[in-house]
Image (tube, rainbow, N blue to C red):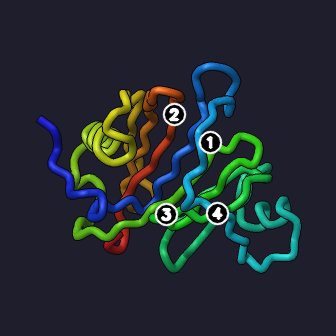
Amino acid sequence: TQPRLPPPAALSAAASAASSGALSGGSPGAASQPRPASVRRRSSSSGWRATPAARAAAAGGPRGFNVVKNTTKGYAFVFPFGWQEVSVDGQEVVYKDVIEPLESVSLSIFPTSKASIAEYGSEGEVAQTLVEKVLTAPDQQTKVLKSERREQEGKVYYSFEYVAQAPNFTRHALTTVGVSNGN
């Protein structure tokens, strides 16, 4: 039996990061997939004058990565140096690799009445439902490779890895979901 989750607009993903790029038919990034019209560059408004390495070190991020942190909205994540911020309709924030444009990290925030992601079901149930009904197109063949639950600072997070096969490419993604402060 499939868990009953609310529609995508009601599902909370306080921290959802996906990295895709394992493409079939050649080297990574070789598939030709048009960039959606809704994707456009967005300038960074961090206001920092220090080098990226100095900013990451000051924020406590790992070497070779930039840190994105929004304490007002309650999220933080890292992305590799050299990636650019772009604007995608429906996403809180998106960073893409300039060399491998199908590799990205994004964050979506949705309101919810739930207090924890665990109220939606187990990590496996939530992963399967999100992959089949929210994160991929209906015509794609999908497979959840791994799902896990973790707690950090009193909050429960589910992380899962999946692949989605489309006619002209395979997407390999990592996603983390959680609920916090009504989102």
Label 1 sits on residue = 102
Residue nearest the viewer, comparing 26 with 183: 26
Q: Amino acid at mark 4?
A: Arg
**Which corner quadrant of the image does residue 14 belong to?**
bottom left
| Separation of residues labelled 1 and 4 (CA atoms) | 14 Å
Task: State the quadrant of the N terminus.
Answer: top left
Q: Which residue in the structure is indicated by mark 3?
A: 91
Mark 4: secondary structure: strand
Question: 10 Å neighbourhood of mark 4: few (<14), some, or many (≥20)?
Answer: few
Type of the residue with mark 1 = Leu
**Residue 40 numbered mark, or none:** 4
From the viewer's side, name the closer residue of 110 and 165. Answer: 165
Please tell me which residue is depicted at 45% across the width and 61% down the height of the picture. Answer: 108
What SS does tag 1 mark? Answer: loop
Residue 171's disc is: 2
Disc assigned to residue 162 = none
C-alpha gap between disc 3 and disc 2: 18 Å
Cα distance between the residues tagged 2 and 1 = 9 Å
Which mark is in front, 3 or 4?
Answer: 4
